[in-house]
Amino acid sequence: DAGASALRLVTGRVPSQAARRASLLAGLLARPARIAPKFFYDAQGCALYGAICELQEYYPTRTERALLERHRAAIARHLPRAAQWVDLGCGDGSKSLPWLAAIQARRYVGVDVSPTWLVRAAQAVEAARSGIECVGVVTDFEEPLDLHPVLSERPHAPPVLFYPGSSIGNFEPQAAAELLASFARHTGGEGALLIGADLVKDRALLEAAYDDALGVTAAFNRNVLRVVNRELDADFEPRAFDHVARYDAVHQRIEMRLVSRRPQAVRLGEEIRHFEAGESILTEYSHKYTAEGFEAMLRAAGYGQVRHWTDPHGWFAVFLARA
Ligand code: AVJ
């Protein structure tokens, strides 16, 4: 049966619908209000994020792709063979395909919050490397990561954790440090971590990347209000909020907000939240690092051997960390 997928799906930690709603509501009732970035990614949000990645102003995706392509052979020389490739936040899995061949991976472990993406990624992997074992783990990165039960099924295949796209940027420093430490516990003595991080740079370049001329990022930001409307039976009017993206040089991060254009009352299920004119909802932090700063974080997380590669402008870097 050529159409059959070899994928085995494992359910990891995912918050219940009730817990998800409760945290969303609590964030909106808090002062200042906030919405976690994971709520961006409904079908419309994923499509808009795909469009962001194609924008001229949004340099991270294409810069990382070029970096990984250009240095693939050099990076692969430092990765273990016969490994299990762990694709964290796999999406369609396409970023991983060339690596599976480059390191002769034995097993593909997709990790994502969306079972639909896990199936798609496994199909792409299966098409590119027929016969490779595929496992999909449904999990939410805000929950403590525990892939040990799955990884220990192949004790002789060292795990290579792949976390591209500067997704780590969404975590505040303390949470980012904890996530890296949990990665280090997963990679152990023989495995490796390959991770992308966006670098500190000129404010104008950063702010343009998060406030593009076509308004795609503004639409992406406002779309989260439609997600909230569905999740909480709320009545946000996306046009009543302005998209704002500012670089905070002290915290080294882009801060994205939705700013109320006028005084308004929004119904959130049974609750009412009043917003003053100019009052904002924090929707995303995107932290930027210096290469030295990120290497230091990796060392503090327990990695002894750390290397990085960067593009000619020094805009983005990929880091390879081993015990
Ligand atoms: C998916 C978190 C890497 O921070 O650049 C892009 C998300 N937000 N434009 C980023 C995003 C606005 C993106 N990450």
Image (cartoon, grey):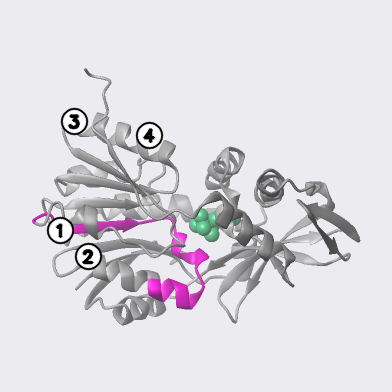
Which residue is at the front of the view, 45 or 230? Answer: 230
Q: Which mark is residue 120?
A: 4
Residue type at mark 3? Ser
Q: Which mark is residue 158?
A: 1
Residue type at mark 1? Pro
> Does the residue at mark 1 contact the one at mark 2 (Cβ under 8 Å)?
yes
What distance separates the C-alpha of mark 1 from that of mark 3?
Answer: 21 Å
- Which residue lies under the disc numbered 2? 187
Q: Residue at x 13, y 65 (%)?
A: 190
Q: Earlier in the sequence, mark 1 or mark 3?
A: 3
> Does the residue at mark 3 contact the one at mark 4 (Cβ under 8 Å)?
no
Residue type at mark 2? Thr
Q: Earlier in the sequence, mark 4 or mark 2?
A: 4
What distance separates the C-alpha of mark 2 from that of mark 3?
Answer: 26 Å
Which residue is at the front of the view, 266 or 190? Answer: 266
- Residue 282 appears in the figure: no
- Which residue lies under the disc numbered 3? 130
Q: Is residue 10 above or below residue 140?
A: above
Relative image position of residue 63 (x, y in whole percent): 43, 54
Neighbourhood count class around disc 3 (C-alpha, 10 Å): few under 14, some 14–19, many 20 upward: few
- Residue 323 appears in the figure: yes
What distance separates the C-alpha of mark 1 from that of mark 2?
Answer: 7 Å
Q: Quadrant of the C terminus?
A: bottom left
Per the rendered image, the range of residues in magenta is: 156-178
Could you tell me which secondary element the residue under label 3 belongs to? loop
Q: Is residue 80 left or right of residue 221?
A: left
Residue type at mark 4? Arg
Q: Is residue 82 left or right of residue 323?
A: left
Which residue is at the front of the view, 241 or 263? Answer: 263
